Image: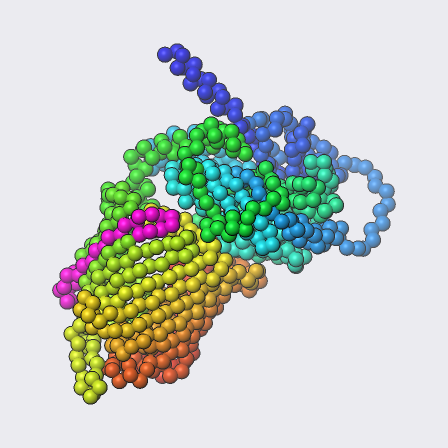
Amino acid sequence: MKKYHFLFFFIFLVISMQAQVTKIRGKVTDVNTSEAIPFVNVYLVGTTVGTTTDFDGNYYFETREKADSIAVSFIGYERQSQAIKLNRYQEINFSLRSNDFQLDEVVVVAGENPADILMRKVIDRKKTNRNNQLESYQCEVYNKIQFDANNFDEKLKSKRLLKQFDFVFNYIDTSTVNGKTYLPVFISETLSDLYVKKNPDKKVEHIKAAKGSGIENPTIAQFMGNLYQEVDVYENHIPIFEKNFVSPLADFTFGYYRFYLIDSAFLENQWCYKLMFKPRRKQELTFTGSLWIHDTTYAVKKLEFDAANDANINFINDLSIRQEFKQLENKYWFMVLDYMVADFTLTDENKRLPGFYGQRTTTYKDFLLNQPRDDAFYNQTMNVTIDESSMKQSREYWEENRHLELTAKEDGIYTMIDSIERVPIFRTYSDAVYTFIYGYLPYGKVEIGPLNKLVSFNSVEGHRFRIGGRTSTLFSENLRLDGHLAYALRDQQIKYGAGIYYTFAKNPLRAAGISFKYDMEQLGSSFNAFSEDNLIGSLFRRQPADKLNLTGEFRFYYDHEWFIGLSNRFELLHRELFPVGNFQLKTYTPEGDSITHNSLITTELAIEGRFAYREKVVIRTFDRINLGTPFPVVNFRYSFGVPGLINGEYRYHRIQAGVSHWFNTGSFGWSKFIVEGGRVFGEVPFPLLVLHPGNETFVFDEYAFNLMNYYEFISDRYASIYYTHHFDGFFFNRVPLFRKLKWREVLFVKGLVGTISDKNLQLNELPKATFMLDKPYFEAGAGIENIFKIIRVDGVWRLSHNDNAGSSPFAIFVSLQFTF
């Protein structure tokens, strides 16, 4: 037994000695005035490790270098030093005493700030230093993502909820950025080969190794790969968390920043100048920090950025970026280190409220320049590929190949996560979070929900009660079953629905599904609207829900993804529509005789397509998280009504297509537009025509005409447009009161044109709520978002067709949104 004790002691000794990090932060002030001193040199004695205090006199750094003391020096003050303790976190403050000496007379002549002169040269050389003249390059990339729960104090440790997790506090560390204690809870690593071809830029990344605590899905490793997290300082704007920060190297930088030349020194045998900068105005999306500029090429050698403390961004208290660059072949500059850390929290006011850090470290090495591959290699449909063995690499492989050695606490995260998942109450906490986010309550291999549909109300059914559920991933990771039962007190009918969904492959997606239902449905609502049995929709209605129909539906579909961003759905859809309440479905014969229909039966074959070039997604078991694309997204659907197939009664062709796009507009925020059009060929009852989406609730619906009522306009050919712009506080940030509230402005406009053919007019008796679209329909709105960070309020004006019965010229809408 003693030999095992010795083995455990030896392992502990080795782990405690590996990858130890010394963390130091502090503040430098004047001993007489207690004022902060910026630009002070702070360094470890006997090493090249050092930094400079910021505009508030603060400094911090982490290092693996060995030293016994830290020193500070600044012109006009006496040098000071203090002893340090290696391999731990510590706060060391300095109070400097001024030197008493007499200066000769100095004549100051007005002229341009030398820092501005240097920055102009940096901006002029941006194209050269971005290696645009380079034909191609490849390199190896190491990427590490880490999440840490922060603000762990003694009170939190004593909470009863965490009693069963007390062992995790052995892994607590302290951040040098703001002094908060944190607990590492997640870590992932990827190692990949990156291939880049210039003019035009094309990139291919091959992930050859990936691992993560509690993660076995390689597509999540893809999300964490290098291509999805680039910060390019040479761009005019740096998009971070959906916001456009103005880069200090922007062509118009002097309109946003003030620069100060504070130092010059050799960095890796290259003479460099150090500049510090800060924003000119408050609460803009800007940085404060420093730049090291190479003296002859005017390239960035090193940078340290911190987001401005008052930047108009939600849920982030601190954001820091560190990058280092290296010159290759005495000509080309490449990034070799890219580090970003963000401190996420729900509120700005309560600094003691637990939150979490997100850290990303990316390193680059083994560059190979101007040896391009064949064009076909760069034109692959998938710009990120994953080796089948990427998640199976051994511990020895990682120890040999990772660019940066893990600290002992980082290395221990893998073991800690496994221990947490074995604590029984962990599942309870996990289920509670899952229910809050997705609306389903996990119960073994099934999930009960959605919970917001358990009780609802409408004018046709009265009070409605529903119970539903679906199988979870514990049941199967390829097969999902779902179903529901509902009963309403007024019509005293039982409604139901069920579905089967099976995935043959997840990347690219190959899946098939069957579903059927016999339930109420609101025709003419957008896909984004609250369903007719949603409690929120019942509570916030502008009009009574008296236009519902009872629908029997059977659907079979097959999803085929050719590659991420390009997919098709093939569908067989059989529907029977039953009028309910006071609603009647009438048509006329050519002779003018009316026919009252008890139901309307259709069977159609359809094909859908979607193309989103270079779309980024995270693939989950049964759904996907869409991370967007910088290019427009194209959608289309064609359906053919087949008479006689499963008792289908009508022959028709329907085609609809649309384009949507989201794009940044620099410091002015961002815009989005949706253009759509369609046509129905054939003479059919009006429910088979295009019922333009209205909204009869007070909840804003981006994909509907919010002041249009259901059935108000019906067409068999149409075109619509929607444009919105989010200013992200561009104007409000200049008004003191609004700047403090961090409100943001939004404007939008929607338009619709359409017609209905004479033959379809002669065939149908349109609902009483329907009017002719003889002129375009327009509505416009102005809104304030980011109220208490999650509330948006819109005022919407109806600009045409205000004479229609039941129309409203103006209304206020409310919605919830969670954005940075």
Which image quadrant: the N terminus?
A: top left
Residue at x 53% of width, y 60% of height? 664
Colour approach in the figure: rainbow
Name the residue nearer the viewer: 563 or 398: 563
Residue at x 24% of width, y 47% of height? 471
Q: Residue furthest left?
A: 492
| Left or right: 627, with 374 as reference point | left
Residues in magenta?
Answer: 486-511
Residue at x 82% of width, y 51% of height? 108
Name the residue nearer the viewer: 687 or 484: 687
| Left or right: 2, with 43 as reference point | left
Instruction: Report if residue 159 is visible in the image.
Output: yes
Please identify the dominant SS of the magenta region: strand
Residue at x 52% of width, y 57% of height? 740
Q: Residue furthest top?
A: 2
Q: Is residue 500 magenta?
A: yes
**In the depicted structure, whether residue 109 falls above or below residue 635:** above
Residue 346 in the image: state x and y as whole percent.
44, 49
Residue 631 in the image: state x and y as whole percent.
49, 60
**In the depicted structure, whether residue 636 falls above or below residue 306:** below
**In the depicted structure, whether residue 793 falls above or below residue 809:** above
Residue 479 in the image: state x and y as whole percent.
26, 47
Name the residue nearer the viewer: 752 or 746: 752
Tally of marks:
0
Residue 486 in the image: state x and y as whole percent.
18, 59
Q: Is residue 265 magenta?
A: no
Instruction: Report if residue 97 is visible in the image.
Output: no
